[in-house]
Image: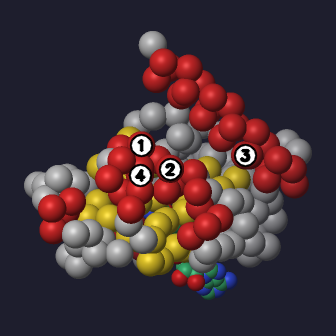
Amino acid sequence: NGYADRLWPGLAEASVPVFSSVLASEPLPSELAARVMPGRQVLYESGLVTVYCRVDAAGRLVIGGRGPMRPSSDAASMGAVRRHAEHLWPELASVAWDYAWNGRVSITPDHLPKLHAPRAGLLIAYGYNGRGVALSTALGAHLAESLTGSVTTETLPLPVSDMKRIAFHRFWPIGVQGAIAASRFRQMIADLF
Ligand SMILES: Cc1cc2nc3c(=O)[nH]c(=O)nc-3n(C[C@H](O)[C@H](O)[C@H](O)COP(=O)(O)OP(=O)(O)OC[C@H]3O[C@@H](n4cnc5c(N)ncnc54)[C@H](O)[C@@H]3O)c2cc1C
């Protein structure tokens, strides 16, 4: 998925390995914990820049979004995620952020997952666009059935397509930072009206 390498020619260039950054706060003070998603819902924003969060069993707010486009476990490098948390719940300004981490998600040009069968007995699935925990697990069972011969690739739940390299792929960090900045600007304008 986001860590696709040279296992198959062109695979690494077929999607963009965007970093997703996560911050976990200290356990929230009880008064604040009672106000931040008190039903313990999971939130996933459909805005122009992806943000997702929940409060965990220890009462920490765990929030993810776009941060630096390099490996990092430094909360200070994830200011945009922290600011978004404080935008949603201003009281979080006084809260410490105990943990930070990030990792790569695989983004495809049309934001849809991809399934390829480049030769008999080989299937490639990736491009979950940051939503692969359930989808990759569910799809895995179907891929195994196809590889063991109990179903054919025609009956897989996703269409099998040809792998396509993304033009100018090596410049992805510049492109992604530009796209995020543009989306943040558009979101700021949209929020004004
Ligand atoms: C910070 C972050 C937050 C995320 N949040 C969410 C979320 O809230 N919800 C959601 O649905 N998705 C989320 N995702 C995306 C989700 O984690 C991925 O879509 C999903 O894990 C992809 O599953 P996969 O099985 O394709 O790949 P992976 O889970 O990456 O598994 C691939 C495995 O293959 C192994 N491997 C790689 N190369 C080789 C090799 N050459 N030989 C042998 N083994 C190899 C790796 O070690 C790894 O264990 C998040 C991702 C990140 C990084």
For residue 177, say whether it is visible. yes
Residue 22's place in the image compared with 81, above or below, is: below
- The residue singled out by tag 4 in the image is 85
The yes-or-no answer for disc 3 within 8 Å of ligand 1 is no
Identified by mark 1, the residue type is His
Identified by mark 4, the residue type is Ala
Binning the other alpha carbons within 10 Å of mark 1 as few (below 14), some (14 to 19) or many (20 upward) gives: few
Q: Residue extending furthest top?
A: 193
Q: Are marks 1 and 4 in contact (CB under 8 Å)?
A: yes
- The residue singled out by tag 2 in the image is 83
Query: Helix, strand, or loop for circle 1?
Result: helix
Residue 149 position, x and y percent, is: 43, 71
Camera-nearest residue between 80 and 18:
80
Report the side of 27 relative to 83 (left or right).
left
Tag in front: 3 or 2: 2
Between the residue at mark 3 and the residue at mark 2, the CA separation in whole angstroms equals: 20 Å
Between the residue at mark 2 and the residue at mark 4, the CA separation in whole angstroms equals: 5 Å
Q: Are marks 2 and 4 in contact (CB under 8 Å)?
A: yes
Between the residue at mark 4 and the residue at mark 3, the CA separation in whole angstroms equals: 22 Å
Identified by mark 2, the residue type is Arg
Q: Which badge, 3 or 2, is on the more N-terminal residue?
A: 2
Residue 115's place in the image compared with 55, above or below, is: above
Q: Are marks 1 and 2 in contact (CB under 8 Å)?
A: yes
Residue 99's place in the image compared with 118, above or below, is: below
Quadrant hosting residue 41: bottom left
Q: Which badge, 4 or 3, is on the more N-terminal residue?
A: 4
Report the side of 111 relative to 35 (left or right).
right
- The residue singled out by tag 1 in the image is 87
Query: Helix, strand, or loop for circle 3?
Result: helix
Between the residue at mark 1 and the residue at mark 3, the CA separation in whole angstroms equals: 23 Å
Between the residue at mark 1 and the residue at mark 2, the CA separation in whole angstroms equals: 6 Å
Q: Which badge, 1 or 3, is on the more N-terminal residue?
A: 1
